[in-house]
Image (spheres, rainbow, N blue to C red):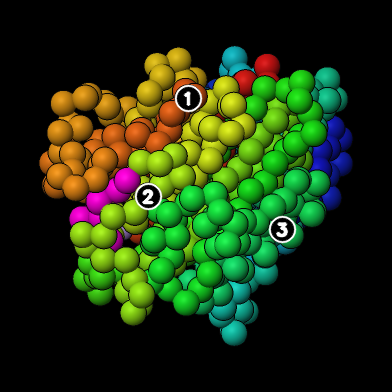
Amino acid sequence: MDIRVSKDPLRSLDGDLLAVFAFAQPEPLGRAAAAVDAALGGAISELGRAGDWSGKAEETSLLYTRGALGVRRVLVVGLGARSAFGLEALRVAAAASAKVARKLRLTSYYAALPPADGLAYDDMAQAVVEGALLGAYTFTRHKTDDASAGPALRGLTVVCRPEEACAVAAGAERGRIIGEAVTMARDLANEPANYLTPTLLAEQAEEIANACGLRHEVLEEADMAELGMGALLGVAQGSDEPAKFIILEHNADRADLDTYVVVGKGITFDSGGISLKPSDGMEWMKDDMSGAAVTLGVMQAVAALGLPLHVVGLMPATENLPGGRAYKPGDVLKAMNGLTIEVVSTDAEGRVILADALAYAARFAPKAVVDLATLTGACVIALGHVASGLLASDDALAGQLLESSARTGEKLWRLPLFDDYAEQIKSDVADVRNTGGRPAGTITGALFLQRFAEGYPWAHLDIAGTAKVDSDRGYVLKGATGHGVRLLVDWLRSRAG
Ligand code: BES
Ligand code: MN
Ligand code: ZN
């Protein structure tokens, strides 16, 4: 999307639509909304007085300027109660404005920043751009009749005062980079599995790497065998599609920088394998590579932002299918760190492929490793589609992630890694078993991963519930969400200081 900043007076803007934001009534209008109100002879105030618009979150009202302003329409967008105002309210309001612009079949519009109310202008601009980009998202590439969806939104101009323009330009650019990274992650996770095999995912990763100057490497199955990645290879046995281990690096040649590793589960389709899933809803197991999609989004964003950190993205990718050579319940696999795994369910495949990826991460001597995975149905039961599970071996790292969560609105809730639960994944025949029964399934999944996440502070995000939603919620639209990109980019920005 073409993101611009204008410091021109509101009267001189020329176009189809100007969005102005306002708090829930009876708060007075902010500067931009008040200026528009005056130009329109009090039309916005009248909306409030008549009770036709109350300013609650996502409530919009459309006015026609009929020559009183250069723009043809003004959209008044509710920010909700002033007491609850923050960047999240602004993202939600910006998404509401983008949805109206799309419904009007516009390809671009203006949005005037609301009163800062204690927020920084760069953060506000970032929030507006992110909200608009994410709220305007569509996934129509497989529809042959694209016309019904209307044209894509191609441009947004953030309007501010001259003295704010510098900060606003920086924030808007950040918002564009991050919003586009989330969009890319959504696209990948929405993509059907026949259009996104591990091979095609690796090709996408290469394209992204080339476009933004990341180091790129793909380990083939022969390489994995040499490294002793028996866990990833075990899961891959059931599919005719070759597994790929995708590695992207930002600032790969900078030994002076701190290293952070992001690991994403890349199961491009999860049938459950021999422990076959019920067919109801199985079509959504195409998004079981959401962790990898988010990792790719994070890598794209950190490269575009030029963060002064060495960031590594690891994406083990395979299908989980019940082919004739598929791994079976009872099989024992040996991971790269030498630990043996008793396979109790072939449907607990995510933790198995992550075992090798987490072991591989140790070779970078990282300051911290964060993995993202659509790991457990239990997490969907516990936290629904609202918050991701956070499980961490390190309290400082958990605290940093919770701070980023608060700033970005990508909710996390921490669950414990008490040793007591480890009883459930003890095996009679191997070092560890890949399931721990129904109780505390998210915790036993994470405790399994912890056996392989040795030698660095580590956190695990279970995004099983948040990677995909069934209905719109503000700027989080039905379908794949890209949940985790904004969170981890914020976290890495905070690490870069
Ligand atoms: N990809 C699934 C988890 C999942 C379930 C994600 C529902 C999104 C929605 C994962 O591979 C899986 O099948 N986990 C099993 C683990 C169990 C066998 C220990 C689960 O949660 O049932
Ligand atoms: Mn599974
Ligand atoms: Zn899975």
Is residue 198 among what the camera can see?
Answer: yes
The percent coordinates of residue 144 (x first, y second) are: 59, 84
Q: Residues within 10 Å of mark 1 (few under 14, many from 20)?
A: some
Upstream in sequence: badge 3 or badge 2: 3
Residue 216 inside the magenta-drawn segment: no
- Residue 151 against residue 85 in the figure, above or below: below
For badge 2, the amino acid type reads Lys
The stretch of residues the image draws in magenta is: 340-346
Marks 2 and 1 close (CB-CB < 8 Å): no
In space, the residues marked 1 and 3 are separated at their CA atoms by 29 Å
The percent coordinates of residue 430 (x first, y second) are: 24, 45
The quadrant of the image that shows the C terminus is: top right
- Note whether ligand 1 is within 8 Å of mark 1: no
The residue indicated by pointer 1 is: 455
Mark on residue 334?
Answer: 2
37 sits left or right of 338 in the view: right
